[in-house]
Amino acid sequence: MSDSTKRPRRRGAALEEAILRAAADELAASGYAGFTMDRVAARAGTNKNALYRRWPNRLALGVDAYRLLTATVQPPDTGDLREDALEMLRRANRHWSSPLGMILRELMAAAGGASELLTRLPDQSTDTTAATWLTILGRAVARGEAAPEALHPRVATVAIVLLRNEFVVRGVPTAPDDVLVEIVDEVFLPLVARRGPAGS
């Protein structure tokens, strides 16, 4: 490539954005197992030093690349709490058994006890998960489908926590749909409908 046709030199935010996009593309193509700083640098058209100045290691870069791949999706708004909750669980179920779900599991295994990295993963961030479920539950409260007292993060997220427990207990990244229905009908809906004082 001649000097006249070389890509312009990127710096600062432009270079960081290019690296992150290249990292996301590499992660999607190779999974975390095949994800290396060398490959990302080559894909971004830069050198490894540029990566290490911004990310201390491939795991930190992998986590940020995964975040880019899984940009926040708006929660469902069907007008019915049961349908919204089921859709949220079905999305999670599909995601965990997808190629992106495999990448997530690889990142979680690589992170081990590095909780500061795990909380950066959208799927594992307590605040992000709670905010989504509180949005759904808040709409249901406004429609009279749930008690206002149900608007608590631990109550709002109980369904997704139970689904994650299914993944752990079963050792597989998916659950039968009847399990999702059972979580919603037998646990979540009764819980959010019975949050008032006893005897009310």
Image (spheres, helix red, strand yellow):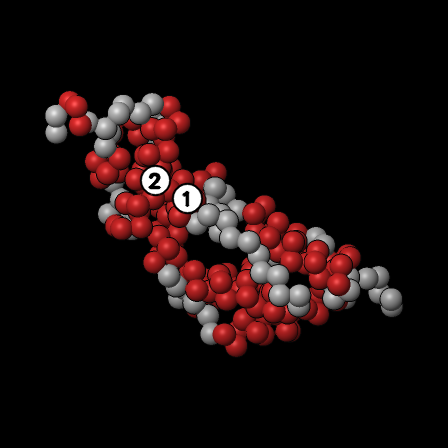
| Residue furthest out toward the bottom | 178
* Quadrant where the C terminus is found in the figure: bottom right
Corner quadrant of residue 40: top left
For disc 2, the marked residue is 21
Q: Regarding mark 1 in the picture, which secondary structure is present there?
A: helix
The residue sitting at 62% across, 65% down in the picture is: 78
- The percent position of residue 123, horizontal first and vertical second, equals 49, 51
- The percent position of residue 71, horizontal first and vertical second, equals 46, 48
- The percent position of residue 156, horizontal first and vertical second, equals 65, 57
Specify few, some or many for label 2: CA neighbours under 10 Å numbering under 14, 14-19, or 20 or more.
some
- Type of amino acid at the residue the image marks with label 1: Leu
- Type of amino acid at the residue the image marks with label 2: Arg
Residue 68, disc: 1
The residue sitting at 43% across, 60% down in the picture is: 95
Residue 55, disc: none
Disc 2 to disc 1, C-alpha distance: 8 Å
